Image (cartoon, rainbow, N blue to C red):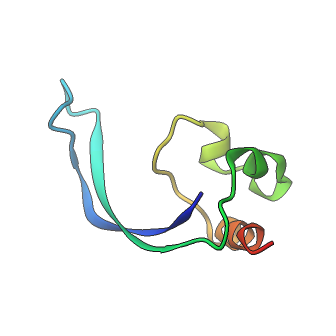
Amino acid sequence: MVGIMEIAREHYPDPAAQNDKFVLVDVAPLKPLPRPVTLGEIKANPALAEMPLVKQSRLSVSPVSAEQWTEIVRMAEE
């Protein structure tokens, strides 16, 4: 993780997909984190073990709880 972004547009069908199973979201950058937090660091942190990113690493956009976000920000500030 390298920065903070916001969803700029609600999900919509991927025009390149052959079916409606795949969707896209548009995002807009807000600010970078003080330092990147690597996937290895996230996977090694027991407080983040339940993140969808850890359980299904092929996700490009996934939910992050408030507690998980607090931990990631803490890690980025170390």
Residue 26 shown left or right of residue 46 in the figure: left
**At x 52% / y 57%, what residue is drawn?**
63
Residue 63 shown left or right of residue 27 in the figure: right
**At x 74% / y 68%, what residue is drawn?**
71
Q: Is 67 in front, or is 37?
A: 37
Give the quarter of the image for residue 8: bottom left
Q: Is residue 49 visible?
A: no
Residue 50: x and y in percent read 71, 49
Which image quarter holds the C terminus? Answer: bottom right
Residue 68 shown left or right of residue 59 in the figure: right
**Count of marks, rendered view:** 0
**Looking at the picture, does residue 21 appear above or below residue 36?**
above
Most extreme residue toward the front is 35
Residue 69: x and y in percent read 64, 69
Give the quarter of the image for residue 40: top right
Q: Is residue 4 visible?
A: yes
Most extreme residue toward the top is 18
**Looking at the picture, does residue 56 appear above or below residue 24?**
above
Residue 24 shown left or right of residue 52 in the figure: left
Give the quarter of the image for residue 36: bottom right
Residue 64: x and y in percent read 58, 61
**At x 76% / y 73%, what residue is drawn?**
74
**Looking at the picture, does residue 56 appear above or below residue 30?**
above
Q: Is 42 in front, or is 51?
A: 42
Which image quarter holds the N terminus? Answer: bottom right
